[in-house]
Image (cartoon, coloured by chain):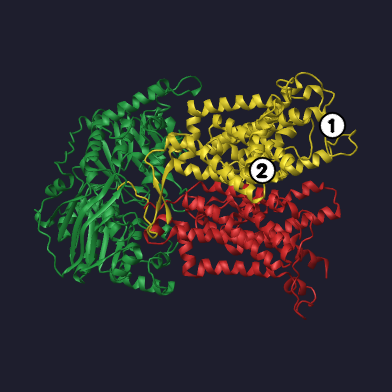
């Protein structure tokens, strides 16, 4: 396996959790809800996924548990913001703080334990192809799932009636309500989908990316996923591009650290975060573009009054 | 004037004793209403009389507390808009229930309950729109469309459901008189096809002209059923309001030719600030001391942008573009323009003219902290609560603002009372220049009359008043001259003596001023 | 059964006052349940968390040490949140203040004079303010989401601090430990009452800052401006207030207070720079701000309560063997309950038995 191929594969591994979490959040925001709790849901997914995989020995059960916990955890957010109409920004922050705290508590006994790994797929002949074999046909199953998820979400949003309904709720909840669309129900479902995705992304971190549990191991990836949604101006395929861009920055700086190019490792480690800021500046600077694409009801409270 | 309620098989809809209570308020109290097949039935009433609540119950967005709805003689429960559409009830909303970011066809698809593909819907919508003479491009983005075009989408969306009963909520409020005529033709055609129409309006002339029967609501109760063709506009108004409406008195302007120009707008142009806003093109207008100038126009033709530019919420590049009392103000902020003696009242009350969750006294401070700095503020900007509260009380008394509690939140006042406070807040300063956008939008008749009269009085006391309004009746009532905005341009003001509804209407529709002269000639 | 909200015509004064207490009680109940599940006696646990730390004078001093940064930061955040600016990067501004304030004692250890400490405090405030000005500038100039940028800058600040104390600023006589040299006597923030405990002047700064900001918010035009722009930006623009100016004001005030907290912590409680100088004060302060209902005087009380939970966490770990990680879970839970209870201020909650039905927000012309 060539050096370049190895790098590309690690980039894909770094990009996959960002992609999954961001695509989930994209659906949430398309329905008009801003859930800043991605980091918290992700870290809960990471700790549960790790723990369940460890206890059962099955990475798949770990993933299922991560998805379930992500969705359940997001339900907490949904209940507060959609039923009790609390401020979405503050509640999202609360979800993140709670997730970081709870996961630290739950995961205390997991620290230092070796995790259960998920193997890569192997298709005879195809995986053995030179250059592209491992890249295209020899990665872990969740990698393929993340691509399917992106395509599926793109198809759902722009090619199905249900997707149209979801977008209409995000554009104008009052109009949607007047037409008899159940705004709250649709938002509950969207938030839970986003939670499930964030949970899966967290599980991927602790089962595939670095098979171990470390407190706060998401290290801001949930926030980067949120930035990716803005970067992608709420389009699924652009999220894919953004996630791989960030995967490349992350892996690039790791390789630079390994090569010892003379720049302190801490400064290299801060590159993904600085890149996030720069990318946000470049995208948001174009006010016209952001204004057209931002779901018009994003973050606005909706009270169905009797 | 009250005809008896007949129950017959020809009735499409019968409503008995329908009641809706919000907290302590009976928004609809024991309402009876019958609509026959093939009739246009008017629902009349003031703002706040309960029309919207009644209609929402018929369309399933609100649940009645008591009462019965019969459809084709059968009792029905309309649990939600899906159920209403299934029965055959269609609705054209007053404030539209459209989605800016979606295409016309997608907007239509959202209210059709089956799974027809978008392309089929687009084709059907297009065919139907042309057959009714309301041409529509199904793939255009709603955000880019004018108000009139948006209403077409609403109507086509409604018609595509092949409803038996069509509810139209204030449909002509956003149309030019000519567009309204076109709509009436469509409605007549629907009636001839046997459809029933429930027509909500407070424009009495059009109700008299077109409707077969009328039900009048006041304070949530039915106060009468009548044949509007046998009534006069005045008698209908009396039924709606419950008493004689105070007529606005417009005294003649004295010495108009010698009066000084207090507000001058010169060559005002503005590029659109957002993707969906209108550019302003070379606007010129003068307002002299003592006069009220009206600015007519269909909503969304740049009035909001014009107001922002004149008020200084958005500044101009050149100082001479806006002159207030002879001083260049184009580059000044709204505060700077206020300090020159100007006052402004925006269209939106809650969230623009007033902060909804703040008390009335705080809302007084909102536009007065700079002009009344000495009275309201001490060292380091410490607010003199007592002085502010006293001024607030003065305004409440001067404008007869009804409220609960001594200093309630702005949002707790009714629309009319809050608007009286917001207008009174500016009048209290005796401004030399007053610019008002939609002074009586959504305001009851009593408050509207009071507001209009106070604007005329302000002008006659020597101030210049500029009123932007969609309500033509209002402008004809108070203006000394009317200019028209269309697509970001403004016509020359037409002196009230020469202005006719037809002339203004044509300008609102975008006709060239020369063309208007031509039309006016035969008269 | 489902829950329906009925909008109150006026904010409820009763629930404005009561909601933090409702949240506290709910958190205690949830905590008791959690401890029972962990097999601990809930009463014992709650005793060690919330009563035991208050029994000794020295531990009251510890309480003040922990409360000082929480209150300072949260007071600044209240200005941000009230003006609808979501600065969640106070942790980074705290570090930036600590770094800027430490320049003198670390780089110029021979400059020893009574002016050092005041200069350190001022530089700390400036450092925090400057770091907070970055998201403000990006928001006003490029329309960039301040939540994301301010948070990203936390990671950058943490990594930068880590590099500085391991690299250029490492104590030459420190046997390669990742820490700076100890601050000299003129660079140490003195204790308030050294006879009884360690509490330093940072706590006094916190109280003074809270009172000043409270006066600004409730009595002055500037405070009015903060609230108007936060509640209805459009009305604020109509009033002639500048929202971009407000973004800078809010971020710089909160950044300066976070920076002051940072340098006070370093020069008062720690005495040198280390790779980690905060147990997440910048994030916990978000909870403090909301528990104090964004009122600086309420924030004093809220800051003491959260500080108590830190101390209680340590006490409970020693006495009943509950992990100190539990505290952070508690704190997160508390914020949830605070936000949920605040709903009661604006709405009455009705439980309805009938099948779900929707209705529109009445537009006043109902």
Point out the frontmost of discs 1 and 2. Answer: 2
Q: For this rendering, which residue is in front, B144 or C21?
A: C21
Asked whether the residues under marks 1 and 2 belong to the same chain, the reply is: yes
Q: For this rendering, which residue is in front, B368 or A145?
A: A145
The colour assigned to chain A within the rendered structure: red
Q: Earlier in the sequence, mark 1 or mark 2?
A: 1
Percent of width and height locating residue A120: 75, 71
Determine which quarter of the picture holds residue C309: top right
Percent of width and height locating residue A126: 75, 79
Q: Please identify the quadrant where the N terminus of chain C is shown.
A: bottom left
Disc marking residue C8: none
Q: Residues within 10 Å of mark 2 (few under 14, many from 20)?
A: many
Percent of width and height locating residue C266: 75, 31
Question: Is residue C129 at all visible to an observer of this figure?
Answer: no
Taking the spot 58% from the left edge, 46% from the top edge, the residue there is C30
Q: For this rendering, which residue is in front, B299 or B242?
A: B242
Which residue is the site of mark 2? C327
Which residue is the site of mark 1? C181
């Amino acid at each position: 396996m060539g050096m370049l191929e190895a790098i590309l594969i690690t980039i894909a591994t770094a990009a996959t959790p960002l992609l999954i979490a961001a695509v989930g959040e994209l659906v949430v925001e398309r329905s008009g809800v801003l859930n800043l709790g991605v980091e918290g849901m992700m870290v809960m997914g990471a700790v549960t996924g790790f723990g369940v995989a460890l206890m059962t020995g099955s990475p798949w059960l770990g993933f299922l548990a991560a998805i379930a916990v992500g969705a359940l955890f997001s339900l907490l957010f949904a209940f507060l913001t959609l039923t009790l109409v609390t401020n979405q920004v503050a509640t999202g922050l609360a979800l993140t703080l709670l997730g970081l705290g709870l996961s630290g508590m739950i995961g205390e006994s997991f620290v230092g334990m070796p995790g259960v790994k998920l193997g890569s797929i192997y298709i005879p002949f195809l995986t053995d192809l030179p250059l592209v074999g491992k890249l295209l046909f020899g990665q872990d199953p969740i990698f393929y799932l993340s691509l399917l998820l992106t395509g599926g979400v793109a198809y759902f949003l722009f090619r199905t009636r249900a997707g149209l309904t979801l977008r209409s709720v995000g554009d104008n909840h009052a109009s949607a309500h007047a037409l008899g669309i159940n705004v709250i129900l649709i938002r509950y479902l969207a938030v839970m989908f986003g939670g499930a995705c964030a949970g899966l992304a967290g599980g991927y971190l602790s089962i595939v990316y670095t098979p171990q549990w470390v407190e706060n191991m998401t290290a801001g990836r949930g926030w980067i996923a949120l930035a990716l949604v803005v970067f992608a101006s709420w389009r699924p395929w652009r999220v894919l591009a953004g996630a791989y861009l960030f995967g490349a920055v992350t892996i690039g700086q790791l390789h630079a650290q390994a090569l010892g190019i003379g720049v302190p490792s801490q400064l290299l480690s801060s590159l993904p975060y600085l890149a996030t800021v720069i990318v946000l500046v470049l995208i948001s600077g174009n006010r016209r573009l952001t204004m057209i694409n931002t779901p018009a009801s994003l973050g606005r409270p909706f009270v169905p009054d009797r | 004037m009250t005809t008896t309620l007949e129950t017959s098989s020809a009735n499409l809809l019968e409503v008995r004793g329908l009641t809706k209570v919000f907290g302590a308020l009976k928004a609809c109290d024991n309402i009876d209403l019958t609509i026959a097949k093939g009739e246009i039935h008017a629902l009349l009433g003031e703002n706040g009389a309960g029309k919207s609540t009644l209609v929402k119950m018929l369309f399933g967005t609100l649940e009645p507390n008591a009462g019965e709805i019969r459809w084709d003689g059968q009792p029905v429960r309309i649990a939600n808009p899906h159920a209403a559409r299934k029965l055959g009830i269609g609705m054209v909303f007053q404030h539209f229930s459209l989605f800016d970011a979606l295409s016309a066809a997608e907007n239509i698809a959202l209210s059709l309950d089956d799974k027809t593909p978008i392309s089929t819907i687009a084709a059907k919508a297009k065919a139907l729109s042309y057959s009714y003479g309301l041409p529509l491009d199904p793939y255009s983005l709603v955000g880019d469309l004018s108000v009139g075009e948006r209403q077409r989408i609403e109507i086509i969306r409604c018609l595509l459901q092949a409803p038996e009963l069509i509810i139209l909520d204030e449909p002509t409020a956003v149309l030019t008189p000519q567009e309204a005529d076109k709509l009436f033709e469509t409605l007549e055609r629907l009636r001839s096809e046997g459809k029933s129409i429930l027509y909500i309006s407070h424009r009495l002339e059009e109700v008299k002209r077109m409707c077969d029967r009328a039900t009048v609501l006041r304070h949530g109760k039915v106060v009468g059923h009548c044949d509007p063709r046998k009534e006069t506009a005045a008698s209908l108004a009396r039924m709606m309001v419950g008493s004689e409406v105070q007529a606005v008195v417009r005294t003649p302007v004295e010495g108009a030719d010698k009066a000084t120009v207090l507000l001058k707008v010169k060559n005002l142009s503005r590029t659109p600030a957002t993707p969906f806003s209108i550019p302003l093109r070379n606007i010129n207008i003068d307002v002299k001391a003592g006069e009220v100038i009206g600015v007519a126009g269909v909503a969304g033709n740049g009035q909001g942008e014009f107001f922002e530019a004149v008020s200084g919420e958005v500044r101009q590049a050149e100082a001479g573009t806006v002159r207030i009392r002879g001083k260049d103000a184009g580059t000044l902020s709204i505060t700077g323009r206020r300090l020159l003696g100007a006052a402004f009242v925006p269209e939106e009350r809650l969230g623009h003219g007033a902060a909804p969750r703040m008390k009335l006294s705080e809302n007084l401070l909102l536009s007065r902290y700079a002009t009344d700095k000495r009275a309201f503020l001490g060292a380091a900007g410490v607010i003199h609560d007592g002085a502010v509260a006293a001024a607030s009380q003065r305004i409440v008394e001067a404008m007869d603002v009804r409220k609960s509690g001594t200093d309630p939140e702005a949002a707790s006042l009714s629309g009319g009372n809050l608007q009286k406070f917001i207008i009174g807040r500016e009048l209290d300063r005796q401004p030399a220049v007053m610019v008002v956008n939609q002074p009586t939008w959504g305001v009851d008749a009593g408050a509207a009359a009071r507001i209009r009269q106070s604007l005329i009085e302000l002008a006659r006391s020597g101030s210049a008043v500029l009123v932007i309004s969609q309500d033509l009746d209002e402008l004809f009532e108070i203006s000394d001259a009317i200019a028209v905005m269309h697509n970001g341009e403004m016509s020359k003001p037409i002196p009230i003596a020469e202005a006719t509804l037809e002339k203004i209407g044509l300008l609102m529709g975008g006709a060239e001023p020369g063309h208007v002269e031509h039309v006016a000639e035969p008269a | 059964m489902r829950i329906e909200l009925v909008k109150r015509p006026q904010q409820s004064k009763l629930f404005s006052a009561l909601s933090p207490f409702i949240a506290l009680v709910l958190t205690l109940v949830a905590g008791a349940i959690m401890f029972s599940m962990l097999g601990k006696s809930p009463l014992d646990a709650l005793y060690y968390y919330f009563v035991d730390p208050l029994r000794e004078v020295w531990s009251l001093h510890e309480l003040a040490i922990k409360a000082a940064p929480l209150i300072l930061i949260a007071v600044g955040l209240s200005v941000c949140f009230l003006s609808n600016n979501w600065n969640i990067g106070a942790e980074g501004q705290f570090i930036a203040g600590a770094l800027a304030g430490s320049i003198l004692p670390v780089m110029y250890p021979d400059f020893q004079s009574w002016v050092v400490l005041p200069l350190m405090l001022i530089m700390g405030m400036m450092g925090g303010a400057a770091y907070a000005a970055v998201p403000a500038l990006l928001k006003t100039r490029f329309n960039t989401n301040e939540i994301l940028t301010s948070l990203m800058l936390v990671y950058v600040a943490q990594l930068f601090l880590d590099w500085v104390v391991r690299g250029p600023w490492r104590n030459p006589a420190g046997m390669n430990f990742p820490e700076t040299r100890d601050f000299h006597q003129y660079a140490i923030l003195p204790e308030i009452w050294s006879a009884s405990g360690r509490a330093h002047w940072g706590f006094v700064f916190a109280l003074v800052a809270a009172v000043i900001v409270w006066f600004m918010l409730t009595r002055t035009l500037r405070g009015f401006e903060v609230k108007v722009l936060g509640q209805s930006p459009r009305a604020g623009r109509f009033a002639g207030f500048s929202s971009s100016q407000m973004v800078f004001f809010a971020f710089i005030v909160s950044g300066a207070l976070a920076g002051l907290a940072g340098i006070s912590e370093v020069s008062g409680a720690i005495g040198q720079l280390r790779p980690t100088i905060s147990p997440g004060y910048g994030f916990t302060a978000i909870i403090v701000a909301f528990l104090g209902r964004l009122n600086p005087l309420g924030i004093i009380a809220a800051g003491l309560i959260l500080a108590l939970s830190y101390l209680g966490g340590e006490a409970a770990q020693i006495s009943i063997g509950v992990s100190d990680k539990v505290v952070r879970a508690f704190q997160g839970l508390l914020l949830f309950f605070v936000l949920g209870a605040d709903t009661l201020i604006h709405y009455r909650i009705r439980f309805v038995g009938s099948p779900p039905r929707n209705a529109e927000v009445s537009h006043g012309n109902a």
